Amino acid sequence: MKAKKTVTDANLDQIVDIENFLIPEMSKREAAKGTANSLAILLTTIVLFFSTKLVSFKVADIVILILVLLFHETGHWLMMKAFGYRDVKMFFIPFFGAAVSGKGRKESAVKRCLVSLAGPLPGILLALLLYWLFSLTKDFLLLKTAKVLLALNLFNFLPLMPMDGGRYVDALFMERRGFRLFFSSLGILAFLAFGAVNLDIILVLVGLATLISAIGEFRLGGLTRRLAAEGIRPSSIAALLEDRPSLRRTLVGLYSTTPRAFEPEPIAAKIHNGLVSVVDNLRIKPARAAAKVSLLGLYLILLLGASVATFILIAADLQETMVTRQIEGQAVNFSQRSLFRELASEIPLDEKDLYHGRGLTFYDGKTELVAEEFWYDHGIRVGTWTDFSRQGLATRMEHYSQGRLTSLESIEDGVWKTMAAGELGFGPRLEEWILSHARPRKSLYQEFAQN
């Protein structure tokens, strides 16, 4: 049985040429590190989207995905700038999107959490805004963009390494190597399972790479604690390379943990990965208990809210179809919308598929329970739109002329009161402005059928 070699500061130079090999290689790899990490996350996200068929290879879908990715990365970029990160760069990948890299100054777990949060959170909020705009304008591109925004950012916000949510939780518990290994295992299992179910070899490879990284992080946890106890706390890889005594002490410890990185020949990539892990854990200020509790609570609230919103929107399964009926000997096309797989509304269509005539919305998918009566003239809102109670009593009336609201009537304490459009508050006035400037209402049944 081959005896395990003992490496000390005295014989370290027999294992690795520090001056001529290690320092130049580490400097070169450090320069490319941020770009590589960002690219890994970006490409993983893109692969997942095409695997789940949320987006196709249609030009419109690809453009939407690129814009969504750009918006996501812009959030990270702005937060890095706000925290004074150095060398903050957003680089573009043709036909794919963008990624961001940067180096933190006096980086802390709290800052790392907020940088991670700045990508998904704005995207989730924008998705909800676009859903609201879609409900007013009925523009299918808004609906499609909102779905991609919500799905991409919610996925990135899940507590799975190496996604943004995974990095968020990992940063909070960076000093707990046992928890970090357990936590990383959840992401590993998720990627392996999803890749196996969908026969997606790339996602399986992502899971395996994350597994290798998690095991390495766990093994280096002990070395990190020993170096910290000795007062070795480099602010960066560059600082460690300049401090020869600390560098040599770190390499001796790294050899004892991962000897295969040095023998039979030193492997620059493995040594660099080990140094990055050790330095990151030494230089980043851990979150205090109060900050940890607050940030974890914030994360759980945001994740739950985004998950519920996504579930509701997916469960709603909004669809629009076209049916044809014979009315007085003529074939008339009707647009029918369904929510939660129940008929929600219907309205006749003209020859250009514009809404035209008397439309109805229903309670509980039952045509005998009318919730609203509304009118269109070749895609333009006209006439009186009336809301009804389940008992069939009118409760609100909106009066339109050529697409614009002129007045509304509502019951207050059993008395009908009238309000001119100009007397509306800011929210209703904004909604009315959007409606009045939206394109004429046209059925979307063809778009739903194609997607």
Image (cartoon, grey):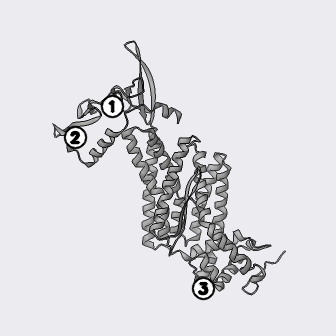
Can see residue 157?
no
Task: Check disc 1 and give the amino acid type.
Answer: Ile
What residue is shown with label 1?
380
Mark 1 to mark 3 CA distance (whole Å): 76 Å
Q: Earlier in the sequence, mark 1 or mark 2?
A: 1
Task: Check disc 3 and give the amino acid type.
Answer: Glu
Residue drawn where x is 43% and y is 63% of the image = 297
Which part of the image, by quadrant, shows the N terminus? bottom right
Locate residue 132: give its quadrant.
top left
Q: Earlier in the sequence, mark 1 or mark 3?
A: 3
Tag of residue 230: 3
Task: Check disc 2 and give the amino acid type.
Answer: Ala
Dot 2, crowdedness within 10 Å: few (<14), some or many (≥20)?
Answer: some
Residue drawn where x is 63% and y is 76% of the image = 222
Dot 1, crowdedness within 10 Å: few (<14), some or many (≥20)?
Answer: many
Q: Earlier in the sequence, mark 3 or mark 2?
A: 3
What residue is shown with label 2?
421
SS class, disc 1:
strand
